[in-house]
Amino acid sequence: MKQIYSILSTKNLIVFISTILSIIVVWNFRDSITESIFPGKSFSGRSLQFQLLFFVIYFLFSELIIYNILMFLFPGYLFAKLQQNHEVIKASGKINFTITPDESKKNISPETFLSNFIFSFISVFTLLILEWVFIISKESFMDDMAILEKIAILFQSIWIIFVISSFMLMVIWFFTRLFKDSKVTTFLSIIMIMVPGLIFTISAMLVFDNFTYIILGKGIVNTNKIFPIIYALGFVLFFNKTTLIIKKYTYRRDSYQKVYYSIFGVLFGLSTLSAISGIFHQVNLSDSFSGFVPQNQPNILLIGADGLNADHVPVYGYHRNTTPFLNSIVNEVLISENNFSNAGSSAGSVVSIFTSKPPFSTRVLNLPDALRGTDAYEHLPGLLNDSGYYNVEITYMRYVDAYLSNVRNGFDRVNGKEVNSNLFSQLFGKIYPVESQYFLDVVLERVSDRLLHIFMIRKMPNPYLEIHTPNSSLDYQYRIPELMKLAKSSDEPFFFHVHLLGTHGPFYHLRSRNFSGDQVQTQKWETDFYDDAILEFDMYIKDLYKLLQETGRLENTIIIIYSDHPQSRDTTERIPLIIRFPNGDFSGRIKENTQNMDISPTILTYLGIPQPRWMEGESMIGTKINNHRIVYSATWRKPKEENQNKRVYKQFGSFRAISCDSYVEFSAISKKWSWGKIAGHTSPCSDNEFITYEMLQDELINRIRKDGFPTEIME
């Protein structure tokens, strides 16, 4: 028996285990690893020599990583110690746990507290700088920021987290001074050490998860059944070992201490200066909230159909009856005949609806773009929330998400999560820089999602899986039932935004068939299937309308039906905008050009809330819209599609301006101008309204210049 324990006490067992695990990992993930290094290539498609060389190199690499992880988690001849404990237990008949004498039996000394203080700062610095590097190394909301702005976000975030963790340490220290009992002091000193230990462990978890997801294509989000428990066990073991190491160095006194203090002093000083500067220069938010509570507070339902063209809806002249229910209430609704999107992507379009600002101004076109500065607080949901509304958004994380778009203090609940209720929003929401708050929100969400998943409290959302799940299935299985439940039982007044993807395409997954019959879709965007998807959307509207009737809420609810962009994402094509006000008020047709940016001003006009000066849209009720006013829009392109040095306009693919039935466009990719007429437009310009293409081009250049873009290559 002693010989067996002697063998186990060596490193042989860990070497053996790491070897087996390395072989399993490299073999199971050989295609993912190959794809991450050689895009478009598979392991099996390479030569035998390549396969052997590849396997050996990555086996050694994996062996090194796994061996060091195991040695860290299970150090110091573990099984020999188990044998020793086994003999102690056998001789005494009981397990003996003792606490070794150290400073913790007395009041914690100022030197020890300062060491804990410094370890806390180092742990916070480690966590946030690793996350900061991870975020700026991929497409993120910081893409078009100057490097100094990015660094300021890092140091401001470090400062605020450190202040909170330091407050916790000071409370613990206070209790160690208050209680004289050595056991209480020992317990509290352990808790004090656990604070930086936990933060270091969280950092390690995120780094490991990022590494496995990038290299192997798998991470915590993909785990289920027993695998989250394995992650949780590793987390606990790492936390235990890290805490022991911190304990060792907390009571250690050596010649390097002054160096540690100096480094801490410099970094903490930079963080403090950055935080003070950020608070001092924080934007004035006084104009972002109305403070006005209207007497008339109807419920508001904003319902979007993704990629829906006006020319496929009967009330806009389509020959097929794709919306029989909307046809039946045509005399109760306000229809905009010539409505346009302000962005050729979902996130940018919805943000334009909320803020009533074009994408040029907010710089939000597609996630991960996010609102910054005052824009993060200037939006319709914030005004409604300030007026007593309960706001909920039901959308898709990858396409539309108010939380990810940084719509702050607007919604109470977004995609099943309570928002704007965390400690940072409550304590620092009005005084701390918006960008740093958003960065911390992103980091905290990444941490909480993974911790709750591995400890099997809440399953981590998987945007990739959601994207590749038939959109219509998610609509009728989750989003529509959630909307119906909320519309039936929520306290009034409420504002619900729902965005559905059944009409998104290019392939459609239908519950029932009408126009497509027994056909099988083989090509993208096939019309018969697209029309059936629109028919399903109309059925959802019908069911919701009936529910509001049955619950007596119909005549106290504004129903707004919109589309984020046309099927082709071409913002010069018309999209539907249909509004039913209580009792059928303001029903009729608007022939003048409208835009999605007009939705928020229209709602405010009906509520009697003064339109803030930062909203650029116009109300569609109570005033007459000029047909020749200019509608601005932009389309998106992947920021990394073009060489970094040539990307003048970052994520913007094109800029467009529409007046009457004419448009001009500047392509940021080809650097060329184009112009033309709007197909199907029902209100062309009269002679005295007509603006020449040259005049429209000048207006677009001036608008882009106003929003801070360079225009030299346009002129």
Image (cartoon, rainbow, N blue to C red):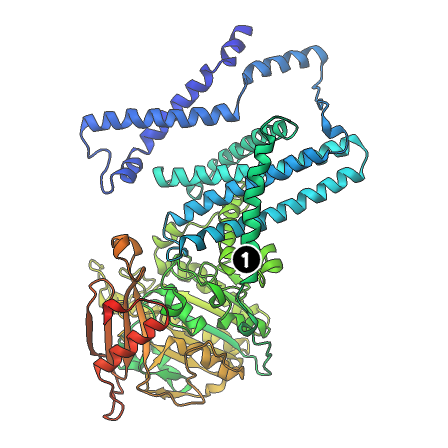
Q: Residue at x 67, y 42 (%)?
A: 169
Count every numbered label the image shows and give the total.
1
- Depth check: give the residue in front, 571 or 250: 250
The three-letter amino acid code for the residue at tag 1 is Ser
Residue 612: percent from the left, percent from the top? 50, 78
Residue found farthest to the left:
47
The quadrant of the image that shows the N terminus is top right
Q: Residue 217: in sight, yes or no?
A: no
Mark 1: which secondary structure? helix
Q: Residue 560: in sight, yes or no?
A: yes
Q: Is 320 situated left or right of 420 in this image?
A: left
Vertical placement of residue 107 versus 302, above or below: above
Residue 626: percent from the left, percent from the top? 35, 88
Q: Residues within 10 Å of mark 1 (few under 14, many from 20)?
A: some
When asked about the image quadrant of residue 120, the answer is top right
Residue 468: percent from the left, percent from the top? 34, 52
Vertical placement of residue 53 versus 493, above or below: above
Q: Residue at x 37, y 28 (%)?
A: 62
Q: Is 115 situated left or right of 47 in this image?
A: right
Q: Residue at x 55, y 64 (%)?
A: 412
In the rendered image, which residue does mark 1 sit on?
277
Residue 140: percent from the left, percent from the top? 39, 54
The quadrant of the image that shows the C terminus is bottom left
When asked about the image quadrant of residue 429, the answer is bottom right
Q: Is 521 situated left or right of 535 in this image?
A: left
Q: Is 620 situated left or right of 79 in this image?
A: left
